[in-house]
Image: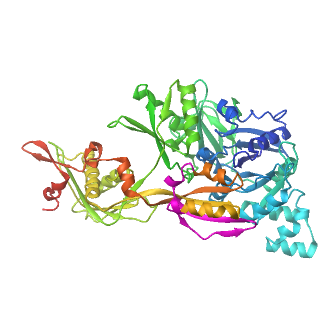
Amino acid sequence: MQYRTIGILAHVDAGKTTLSERLLVEGGSLRAPSGAYLDSDAQEQARGITIFASQAEFQHGGFTYQLVDTPGHIDFAAEMERTLAILDAAVVVVSAPDGVQGHTETIWQRLGALGVPTFLFLNKCDRAAPGPALAEVRSLLSEDCIDLSGGLGPAAEALAERDERLLEVYLEHGYNQAAFIAAAREMVRQRRLFPTFCGSAREGVGVEALLDGLDALLVPHYAPAAPFAAQCYGVRRQPDGTRLALLKITAGTLRPRGHVGAGKVGELRLLRGAKSENLPLAEAGRLCAASGLPEVRIGDGLGAAPPLPGGALKPLLSAKVLFSCPPQQAVSAFKTLEDEDPALAAEWDAQLSQLTVRIMGQVQLEVLTEVLRTRFGMEVSFAPPEVLYLETIAAPVEGWGHFEPLRHYAEVGLRLEPAPRGSGISFASECPTDVLALNWQRLIETHVFERTHRGVLTGSPLTDVRAVLLCGRAHEKHTEGGDFRESVYRAIRHALMHAENVLLEPCVQLSALVEPADAGRLLSDLSRMSAETAPPVPQGARTRVQAVVPLSETLGYAQEFAAYTHGRGMLSLLPAGYRPCHDTAAAVARRAYDPERDVEHTADSVFCSHGAGRIIPWREAAAHMHCRR
């Protein structure tokens, strides 16, 4: 059996789920479109959007297609992105009346970054001629989007222009179907060709041509005889609470009760919309759901498979959870949801009795509220979302940590250095091994990375710092592993208390396409939002404006933009990394974080005096360090 995994991707309301169900009808897996086969969750039906990725399969051209229907709303982009790396091909749906929309560009960029072969379907051509939309697709996405609605023959010249050897064949012999299919397959694989089809999913027009194109031009490669390999792209729970790890088998086979690493598979299930059935064998290329693997997490590579690449569409907002149930109940529920959506990053602060989650937007909060009510019987609400700040330093600074209660001993001296933006935390050592043994130095390195260190301006995570080990001391009898953990944490915090700290805020790359009459309003808004704006550029009859904007200034702007452009403008907001905060003083004041009251992240050291531990405040600690004597 030859399996092909395709994902249907689109901006919300482009007709993605309609096309998905039409493919199932054409493939004989669904009698008629219902709108509820894939969007089976009550919230999906109530809101008319896809929230949770779902899958089904159908047969066509002798192949088994495994179809993944993904969310189109930006608030659920992380759910969409998790499926991209396991696709053999993506089908991007563009609405002919609406053209390329904001989230379409986001999807396109992520597919390019992951190297996923991509087909396009210009939908709703019964409502608008495809010509303008096709021109916009070629202008905004790629000139290699070639209309193959009529097959390869009518597009022979355009295809030959994209391949030198094919051009030679074409000029010498004219159109040769075998040569053109072989060349087109390779161009699709290399993302030098994006086959495009026009039609109407609702009316079933153009869908058969899309399927024929997939049959002819998509050639995935699997290794059924190789050792077992699989990747986990999702986690779901059945109504009875059974945890299922969603796997794509990339090599070998998997059976029920088979061993995966240290775990043992229980059942294998084949998911079909809201239903599932037992699967006796999962071969290379197959999607399946396995029970009995509690240690397998989303993104894990199993057997010989590498882990899935990390996502780029990460939440840039956080929200405090307001609940009335016992804290353990709330934390347990959110940890279950985090298992299914790691981007939530639920964090419980015992000191403040505060639970926070990371989110993409307001709609996601509304969905979470309903999920907690229906699945866990919990009534919760959320405080207004806040942006996720980070902190770094502007100049090198030393920090010292000493931990010496009775019968314990460890001391560490570090230098923190600014690192390039986006590089995270790194480690190096300048400490000779005759001063501190290599095994202790490796333990110190582990402790640098094992924790999210908080900055001292707002308590936000520390990033873009190189930690250099200068010196360390251990005691032959009294040093235990946890002692260096305490001294490393204190040394980093000690350095930050003396550092020139920098608050970083998330920014977005704003790209807007507006009527010339609306450009002035947009530019005025961007100036007010402290944006770095490029000069406007004419694009056809409209104006393209691009800018880098602090995320905090864009909250709620999409609705405002839609109002003054009367729905005719196109707005795209893509993550643009972190930059120094444009209103640091105001942000620090809003957070009201006191680093000296954060006892979980103390900069003070502990020395032994008269047989007992004595706390030395961070301002005085450096003078007491043994390494500095």
Image check: 332 left or right of 193? Answer: left
Q: Nearer the viewer, residue 241 or 494?
A: 494
Q: Nearer the viewer, residue 75 or 211?
A: 75
- Find residue 409 and report its horizontal and vertical position in percent: 18, 48
On the image, which quarter does residue 169 sit in?
A: bottom right
- Find residue 51 and report its horizontal and vertical position in percent: 64, 39
Q: Is residue 257 above or below residue 579?
A: above
How is the structure coloured here? rainbow
- Find residue 105 and report its horizontal and vertical position in percent: 67, 57
Does the stretch in magenta take in 534?
A: yes
Image check: 588 left or right of 406? Answer: right
Q: Work out which residue is located at the far left of the displayed protein and give it.
A: 610
Q: Nearer the viewer, residue 517 or 456?
A: 517
Q: Quadrant of the C terminus?
A: bottom left
- Find residue 601 and report its horizontal and vertical position in percent: 29, 46
Highlighted range, magenta: 527-556
Image check: 541 left or right of 595? Answer: right
Does the stretch in magenta take in 10?
A: no
Residue displayed at 76% across by 65% down: 144
Q: Nearer the viewer, residue 164 or 376?
A: 376
Q: Is residue 216 visible?
A: no
Q: Quadrant of the N terminus?
A: top right
